[in-house]
Amino acid sequence: PVFGQEVTILTDPGADPHKGTGAVMCCTFGDTADVAWWYTHKLPLVEAIASDGRMTAAAGAFAGLSLAEARKQIELALTAEGYLLGRQATLQSVRVHERCDTPVEYIVARQWFVRVLEYKEELIAAGEKVRWHPDHMQARYRAWVENLNWDWCISRQRYFGVPFPVWYCQECGETVVADEEQLPVDPFDQQPSRACACGSTSFTPETDTFDTWATSSLSPQIVGRWLTGPDLYDQVSPFSLRPQAHEIIRTWAFYTIVKSHFHFHTIPWTDVLISGWGIAGEGMGKISKSRGGGPMPPLEMIERYSADAVRYWAASTGPGKDSVISEEKIQMGSKLVTKLWNVARFSERFIETYHPPEALPALSPADRWILSRAQRLIRRVTGLFQQYDYAAAKSEIESFFWTELADNYLEMCKQRLYEGAPAEIDAARYSLYQVLLAVVKMLAPFLPYVTEEIYLGLFASSDSQPSERVSIHSSSWPAPDERLEDDQAEKMGEILLAVATAVRRYKSEHNLALGTGLNRLQLATVDPAHAHALRESTADLMSITRASRIELVGELDPSLETVL
């Protein structure tokens, strides 16, 4: 009414007769529904908002006003002319910018597009050639491609960005694209290498820049040096892995597949690993700088607990899953870092200058047990990493470190390390060196800082070439040693653990500290093999149980308290 503009009333299945009055206002443009109706019904185009966010001449007396001010002035005009019948608060769903929450407005502008709609089936097929981790994320990719309604807009109206190598003839308006030999080119600084077909040499540069995804979708080609090192690119393409988050499957993953398919008729990588979000808190959305990081900003958590502890939390949730930031989980990571450091400090006096021999020393049953268990761990963890299941890998390493290495083997071998004969010390040093090195290397992706310090302090000089002192992160991944895999030793190790567990339980039930000494520990077995292994393990069992004397018998003395 303010503008005296008449509109035609039309019917459309998109209008819901049961919602409000059943009538829907259409303008150019409020949302995507307006765009569809404008296109379907061939409505006139009224451009009321300019690219600077102010009203155009189409707004008459309100031209030049910001949108917020125009709303106020239009309301005043409606009131003054008696058109405003009332006002009430209404809850509406409004699309806003993801960072500043400013409402999004639609304006009309010419853009550059890449055709993708007519290639949907090919792009779906390309996505199926990629292995998705977790595999259900492929469904998100497929759903996105199947439901695309428009081609890929690759242009943006921004100052910073990669320029289009394009000019427009000032005489005839013809679009002139740079010759391939002229690339890269900035159309503001350079002119086309040839005149326009009309003969003119006066050109206006394209002011748009490429969308970020139009260039980042070429990351495999850039990293593989497609233009500068084609031999290298042929060796590494397709790449093995793209790690990325789930919300950009529709952009980074999709557009990278589009580029590789259109340019090279292949997939860009064989696998894509989809991570989840770090959530600021229940119902708070993802952690972001623009929102302050939530109640537990990661930088504060790093200052309080260390970067390794925060990485521990981040790696505790498997691929594709969101994870609410947890101070409790970060504290668990901090405890692991501290325990690993303490184990390394204890081990330092025994292995700092140690160089393990090629030949195996005379290993005790406990040594053979922990070394065999470590080889199994290396196989399991390597397999999990090959499946990109880093959370399960971390859990396996952590469980082994706490329950087998720190809580049991170290307690078994301490007495040998301090007081054993030279051959016994050599066996314990060898086992401790090999197992701790493997654990530190496997934890390095999760705890990169503490493992680097431990590696450089204890292992770098013996694990690398004499002329090198490399970072743990460029050292070799541990490989299982088949010589050390021993099913029988692992079964014997379970018996040793059962003895240690029973003694600990006995002390706990009698309110005794775990370090409390025992005058005598009697073990009964009628199995000759077990008796032999227990006899070989006497020093280790005395160390972990704090027993002054261990007796091996065929039958327990009934006058003693039975703990096993």
Image (cartoon, rainbow, N blue to C red):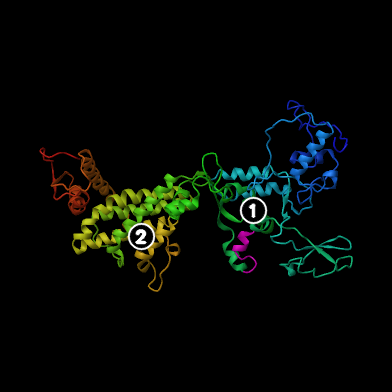
Corner quadrant of residue 77 = top right
Q: Is residue 418 left or right of residue 377?
A: left
Quarter of the image where the C terminus is located: top left
Secondary structure type for disc 2 = helix
Magenta segment boundaries in residue numbering: 218-228
Residue 435 visible in the current orientation: no
Secondary structure type for disc 1 = helix
Q: Is residue 318 left or right of residue 520?
A: right
Q: Amino acid at mark 2?
A: Leu
Separation (CA) of disc 2 from disc 1: 40 Å
Corner quadrant of residue 328 = top left
Q: At which x and y percent is residue 556?
A: 13, 41
Mark 2 sits on what residue? 437
Residue 104 visible in the current orientation: yes
The structure residue drawn at horizontal position 87% and vertical position 65%, both measured from the top left corner, is 197
Q: Residue 257: which disc?
A: 1
Q: At which x and y percent is residue 540?
A: 21, 53
* Residue lying at the far top of the rendered structure: 18
